[in-house]
Image (tube, rainbow, N blue to C red):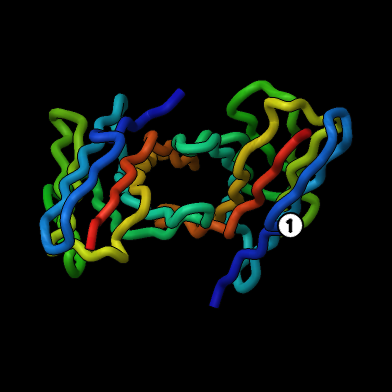
Amino acid sequence: SQTIHQWPATLVQPVGSPLSLECTVEGTSNPNLYWYRQAAGRGLQLLFYSVGIGQISSEVPQNLSASRPQDRQFILSSKKLLLSDSGFYLCAWEPTGTQAFFGQGTRLTVV
Amino acid sequence: SQQGEEDPQALSIQEGENATMNCSYKTSINNLQWYRQNSGRGLVHLILIRSNEREKHSGRLRVTLDTSKKSSSLLITASRAADTASYFCATDAGTYKYIFGTGTRLKVLA
């Protein structure tokens, strides 16, 4: 069966520090992969999606970037965090045309 | 920008009552999905309804879709305290992207 791993669960980082959040999927190949951000009490904002290795589509201009170095690995990064980057980050994968499966999320607090 | 908007933003009901949440979207879709999120956790898929379907059932869940009005509703019958969560609709416009609404926070009082 397929599983998705996202870590860490919580992260507190100072302003100006770098960020790397990792997401991996097991049990499937060539999944569509997504990064979402959720502000407190709000809906999900699509940040990036990827349909294949090295293929990244960005939905909103921001202080973040994403990479897909391997088929089942999706990384969210920042060179210098801003206070406004705080939020709940969710990774998801999808077998094309069906439901999305979400990781448990990373709560990032930038201080 | 958000594709879907849920209504109401928050809903509080007594256990045993039915809960109805609505979702409106802006563009044509291939399918619409409903997800549930417990506080501070990832989202869990509840049900998918395709654009050529008008109604779908899954256990205590009933979803309707009106493509002419670009709207969907989620009905939870005989609610339980464990149904307390946020509920989101998500639309797939066929471009590999799921666009989520702002969510309805449901609280079921025991």
Location of residue A95 in the rendering, given as x and y in whole percent from the top left corner: 49, 59
Q: Name the quadrant of the C terminus of chain A.
A: top right
Chain bearing tag 1 is A
Location of residue A54 in the rendering, given as x and y in whole percent from the top left corner: 75, 44
In the drawing, does residue B72 fall left or right of residue A82?
A: left
Query: Which one is nearer the viewer's eye here, A43 or A12?
Result: A12
Density class for disc 1 (Cα within 10 Å; few <14, some 14-19, many ≥20) is some
Residue B93 in view here: no
What is the quadrant of residue A2 in the picture? bottom right
The residue at the far front in this view is: B110
Residue pictured at 32% horizontal, 49% vertical? B33
- Dot 1 falls on a residue whose secondary structure is loop
What is the quadrant of residue A8 in the picture? bottom right
Location of residue A82 in the rendering, given as x and y in whole percent from the top left corner: 77, 26
Residue A110 in view here: yes
Q: Name the quadrant of the N terminus of chain A.
A: bottom right
In the drawing, does residue B52 fall left or right of residue A110?
A: left
Location of residue B52 in the rendering, given as x and y in whole percent from the top left corner: 18, 46
Residue pictured at 73% horizontal, 27% vertical? A83
Question: Mark 1 — residue?
Answer: A8
What kind of residue is marked 1?
A: Pro
